[in-house]
Image (spheres, rainbow, N blue to C red):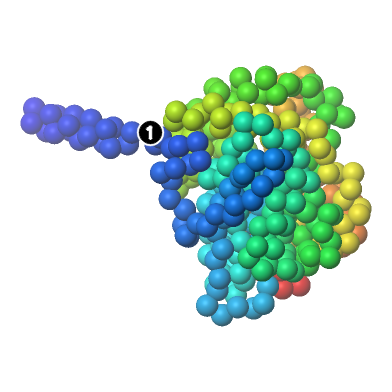
Amino acid sequence: MKYCLALLMFVCGSSIAAQPAVYGPRLEGFEYPYPVKTFQFTSQQQALEMVYMDVKPAKPNGRTLVLMHGKNFCAATWVKTIDALVKAGYRVVAPDQIGFCKSSKPAHYQFSFQQLASNTRALLASIGAEKVTVMGHSMGGMLATRFALMYPEQTEQLVMVNPIGLEDWKAMGVPYRSVDDWYARELNTSAEGIRKYQLNTYYAGEWRAEFDQWVEMQAGMFRGKGKEIVAWNSALTADMIMSQPVVYEFPQLKMPVLLLIGELDNTALGKDAAPPALQKTLGNYRELGPKTAKAIPRATLVNFADLGHSPQIQAPDRFHAALLKGLAQ
């Protein structure tokens, strides 16, 4: 009887200790792995703040990497990549884009990849980072591509990690979803839904307890009082992704491009709204990787046959070994 009571108290105590995290609309309460700084600037007639980490190595090799996060990610999710790069001598700048994570979430903003690229370039100018290698994951791959196209003289190398936008979903028949529809959908964001999606897409059916922190990072913003502005910015950026493809401009990339692709990825924004027959054809990264590499003049493709959308999180040692080798070449 005493054992049962003790067990019950332990379970109840554990449940209390494991209360879901609640974060502010700018991810207040969630600690980043390195000190954060704030770049204040004016854009579209409003004052905005872009939060970023600028991590410098003890023994610099003279190169700077700019890390661009995905739509459901933040600068903090790059933590193991930052560690590996800094150890190898790279300076690393990892911003949260406007509309995401710790940066400003405006009520009215004309989101475009051109605008976000321009914002990022202004940030880099403010900290004296001239020549850079840009690395983008997921949506960040689309942004990094746009940055490289707009500022080729500043971009030494482009690295894309399971970028989305390797196909034009709208042209393929994915139905239009209005910003208001996206907003209603985003308001229903939950930890359970995030975890299920990440299990099937980010980690190819493999789950480890360390992944929970990234679920809570995202879900925590939708539990707080500012969830409406978080959902609204998420809706606006979803529309940006759907309406601004970069796939047609890959042949224009002149710098060396490194593609790091987890082949078990199946990401395609708006897939759930597509007819079942079309859904089966979308987000096939085993085919999209080679197709993309063929379209880019100076591309190097590295495949991870057993990994999903986030190889840098799922298998960091293997991923970073390939990344560092690709950067050196």
Q: Considering only vertical position in the picture, is 268 above or below 68?
A: above
Say which quadrant the C terminus sits in. bottom right
Q: Considering only vertical position in the picture, is 308 above or below 189?
A: below
Judged from this view, the residue extending furthest toward the left is 2
Report the number of numbered marks: 1
14 lies left or right of 242: left
Q: Considering only vertical position in the picture, is 111 above or below 114?
A: above
| Residue 234 picture location, percent across and down | 63, 32
167 lies left or right of 187: right
Residue at left offset 84%, top offset 54%? 149
Please, what is the three-letter code of the amino acid marked with disc 1?
Pro
Residue at left offset 59%, top offset 26%? 186
Q: Which residue is mark 1?
A: 20
| Residue 246 picture location, percent across and down | 83, 44
Say which quadrant the N terminus sits in. top left
Q: Quadrant of residue 46?
A: top right
